Image: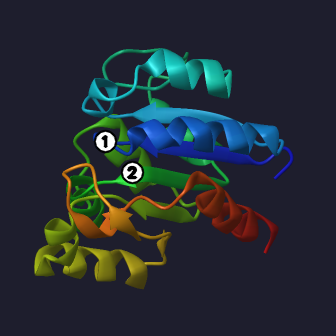
Amino acid sequence: MKDKHVLVGVTGGIAAYKVAELVRIFRKDGAEVRVVVTKNACEFVAPLTFETLSDNPVAMSMWERRTESPTEHIALARWADVFVVAPATANVVAKLALGLADDLLSTTALACEAPLVLAPAMNTSMWKNPAVQANVETLRTRGAVLVGPAEGDLACGESGPGRMAEPAEIKDVVAGLLTA
């Protein structure tokens, strides 16, 4: 993964805490990492965590310029060799399947031509919901690569499919895409 550009999109789910380790692993393997967070992701992990681990400013809003580009979503999309969205909540899966673009993460995803890797994370009932499954199938048909979800204990106290895949597993899938 040396010198590869990995764009990581972080959404508002409890599994966001695992993404800090994912960013650390990507950097350890030589990748340059940039992070885009949703407003809800900031409720779970502070942007400073991702800035420190990625050694890059975190992109948070279409309206707050942190770079010199007035079209940051386009600049990020063109920069990326791969775009990893983790955790991929039911909300972001639906937005991406429908082509909605109402925040920096979704506009960047819509503009990005690099491979899209999604690491779903949600309650088992949400994961099994026919609407979520239809959205997942739509994204797979368009070439998105899904890693997980894993089966196990969930934050809500239930157990079943819905856990975000472990960071090392996500990294291995991304590394495979970048070396293919």
Q: Amino acid at mark 2?
A: Pro
Residue at image location 63% in from the left, 48% down from the top: 80
Give the camera-side residue of 68 and 41: 41
Where does residue 11 sit, x and y in percent of width and height? 34, 42
Where does residue 2 sit, x and y in percent of width and height? 86, 47
Residue 63, quarter of the rendered image: top left
* Residue 150 horizontal side relative to residue 43, left or right: right
Reading the image, the residue beneath label 1 is: 14
Q: At numbered mark 2, what does the secondary structure look like: helix, strand or loop?
A: strand
Residue at image location 41% in from the left, 20% down from the top: 46
Q: Amino acid at mark 1?
A: Ile
Q: CA distance from mark 2 to mark 1?
A: 8 Å
Residue at image location 27% in from the left, 54% down from the top: 92
Residue 65, quarter of the rendered image: top left
Where does residue 36 sit, x and y in percent of width and height? 46, 34
* Residue 9 horizontal side relative to residue 94, left or right: right
Reading the image, the residue beneath label 2 is: 87
**Tags 2 and 1 in contact by the CB under 8 Å rule?**
yes
Up-down: is 171 above or below 66? Answer: below
Mark toward the viewer: 2 or 1: 1
Q: Note whether residue 57 is visible.
A: no
Q: Using a 10 Å C-alpha cutoff, classify the residue at mark 1 as few (fewer than 14 neighbours), some (14 to 19) or many (20 or more).
A: many
The disc label shown at residue 86, or none: none
Residue 28, quarter of the rendered image: top right
Up-down: is 20 above or below 134? Answer: above
Residue at image location 33% in from the left, 58% down from the top: 121
Q: Note whether residue 9 is visible.
A: yes
Give the camera-side residue of 82 and 168: 168
Q: How many marks?
A: 2
Where does residue 176 sit, x and y in percent of width and height? 74, 70
Give the camera-side residue of 18 and 82: 18
